[in-house]
Image: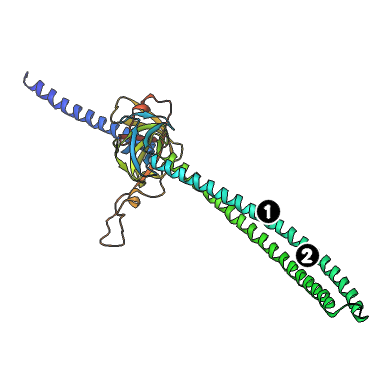
Amino acid sequence: MNETKPKKGRKIIFPIILGLVLVGALIFTAKEYIYYQNHAVTDDAQVDADISPVVARVNGYVKEIRFQDNQYVKEGDTLAILDDRDYKIKLQQTEAALYSAKQTVNVSQSNVTEAKTGITTAEANVEAAKVQVWKTTQDFERYQNLYNDQAITKAQFDDAKAAKDAAEAQLVVAQSQVPVQTKKVSSDQTQVGATASNIASRLADIDYAKLQISYTVIVAPSSGIVSKRSIQLGQLVQAGQVLFSVVHSNDIYITANFKETQVGDLRLNDRVDVEVDAFPDSAIHGIVQSFSGATGAKFSLLPPDNATGNFVKVVQRIPVKIILQADSALLQSLRPGMSVKVVVHTK
């Protein structure tokens, strides 16, 4: 009798344990089902930030480096200086060219003034020639009357006629000089305009030379952490070469790649919980800000083309940008590329 009771007890305990396990599994399944009906979850997500590559805009040797690797810098801080002696010499050359152009303009303006004086002189010569023509004409008429009366000799009459003809010829010459001087004024004024345009060109050259000099001082485009330095003192850098990068410290956000089957439940400004793998005991909150214009595969180097080969349907993922609460103390410790888990409250 004593051996039968333990056997019956064991037979009763096993169904009870099995029932409890099944009830627990059912409760767990129900909770998970309800949870995922109200949340969209993905661990295909990472910390992101704007990263500005700092590029050399002129050629030159590195003269100074004013930052350490991974140092925090503020926008406008001087980070590196290139040797600017070549560009300063170029500036001096352009300034000398400007001085020469200004002197040329002064000479051209003097020529215009001189030409205008020549017009006045030519017009005065015309008036003088007209007076001389009038006088010689009067003398000629008097001598002609005297010659007709045989009061003077033929030689005297010829002298009077020659003087009249010479005065008329002088008048023609004087009158021809007026348009010549006028044309010279116009030509000199055109020359002034041409040399004045050279001044504008020289001023532009000076501005460009100063701009080139300013490019030898390399400043931080934004506040952040300087990383990935690729320059050394004395190194010759070329225009367009990336010198280092600045990771924007004020623009930390999350890029979460949700399945296309999940995106239909997401809405702008949905509340988000973010768990960073590096800090599992701390949570960050944010909101959904925007959705990518295409799936991640479309932006890949070799996007898939379903029109070729055998088609295999693959669930695509769409990047979703999540902005974080600015008051979170953990933001200062986040770095782009960190892995995170994202939970979006969809309902």
What residue is pinned by disc 2?
126
Residue 73 position in % (x across, y down): 39, 29
> Is residue 56 something that shows in the picture?
yes
- Foreground residue among 206 and 316: 206
Residue type at mark 2: give it: Val
Q: Is residue 271 above or below residue 159?
A: above
Single out the residue that lies furthest toward the right: 149
How many other residues sit within 10 Å of disc 2, few (<14), some (14-19) or many (≥20)?
many
Sequence-wise, the earlier of marks 1 and 2 is 1
Q: Which mark is residue 113?
A: 1
- Foreground residue among 238 and 168: 168
Q: Quadrant of residue 131?
A: bottom right
- Foreground residue among 184 and 126: 126
Query: Which corner quadrant holds the N terminus?
Result: top left
Q: Quadrant of residue 59?
A: top left
Nearer the observer: mark 1 or 2; the answer is: 2
How many other residues sit within 10 Å of disc 1, few (<14), some (14-19) or many (≥20)?
some
Residue type at mark 1: give it: Thr
Q: Residue at x 36, y 26 (%)?
A: 330
